[in-house]
């Protein structure tokens, strides 16, 4: 039987947070803007968004920004027990979403749509 007062119980318990989704939206917002400053009061740490035309096509334009990776390392340095893999997965999903490599029909799934609508209503 697990005792919640025991420290080993918490060490063996897994949890999933919302911060991976926030990292994904951080990537999307950084790619939609001209740059991002991970530390607002340090203007020397701003990162610009780079844009590459793929095979000379203006329709396929890939954008990239190093800012979310710097924030990932900063969060991991400040909070070493935070989920590095979860945050990195959020960053990767943010890039895939912005580059339109994720299928958009997954966002019409009720498990995604209902909480989103509840957040909008709130």
Image: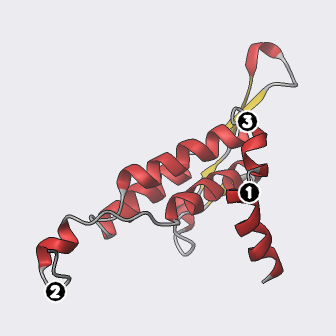
* Label 1 residue SS: helix
Q: Farthest right residue? A: 59
Q: Which residue does the numbered mark 3 point to in the structure image?
A: 103
Residue under the point 69% across and 42% down: 97
Categorize mark 1 by other alpha carbons within 10 Å: few (<14), some (14-19), many (20+): few
Q: Which residue does the numbered mark 1 point to in the structure image?
A: 110
Q: Farthest top residue? A: 55
User: Compared with residue 7, is residue 95 higher up or lower down, i.e. above or below?
Assistant: above
Ranked by sequence position, the earlier of labels 2 and 1 is: 2
* Label 3 residue SS: loop
Residue under the point 77% across and 41% down: 104
Work out which quarter of the rendered image holds the N terminus and state it. Answer: bottom left
Ranked by sequence position, the earlier of labels 2 and 3 is: 2
Tell me the quarter of the picture where residue 13 sits.
Answer: bottom left
Q: Which residue does the numbered mark 2 point to in the structure image?
A: 5
Q: Is residue 56 left or right of 86 when viewed as pictured?
A: right
* Label 2 residue SS: loop
Residue 64 appears in the figure: no
Find the distance from the CA under tag 2 to the CA under tag 1. 37 Å
Ranked by sequence position, the earlier of labels 1 and 3 is: 3
How far across and how far down the image is residue 36, in percent?
A: 63, 58
User: Compared with residue 110, is residue 59 higher up or lower down, i.e. above or below?
Assistant: above
How far across and how far down the image is residue 58, in percent?
A: 87, 24
Q: Is residue 122 left or right of 25 when viewed as pictured?
A: right
Residue under the point 12% across and 72% down: 8
Question: Between tags 2 and 3, which lies in front?
Answer: 2
Work out which quarter of the rendered image holds the C terminus and state it. Answer: bottom right
Categorize mark 2 by other alpha carbons within 10 Å: few (<14), some (14-19), many (20+): few
Residue under the point 80% across and 25% down: 60
Tell me the quarter of the picture where residue 115 sits.
Answer: bottom right
Q: Is residue 43 left or right of 62 when viewed as pictured?
A: left
């Amino acid at each position: 039987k697990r005792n919640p007062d025991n420290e080993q119980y918490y060490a063996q318990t897994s949890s999933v947070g919302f911060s991976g989704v926030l990292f994904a939206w951080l990537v999307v917002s950084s790619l939609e803007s001209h740059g991002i400053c991970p530390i607002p009061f340090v203007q020397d740490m701003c990162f610009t968004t780079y844009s590459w035309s793929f095979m000379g096509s203006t329709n396929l334009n890939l954008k990239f920004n190093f800012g979310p990776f710097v924030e990932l390392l900063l969060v991991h340095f400040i909070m070493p027990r935070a989920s590095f893999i979860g945050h990195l997965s959020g960053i990767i999903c943010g890039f895939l979403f912005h580059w339109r490599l994720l299928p958009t029909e997954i966002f019409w799934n009720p498990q995604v749509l209902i909480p989103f609508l509840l957040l909008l209503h709130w």
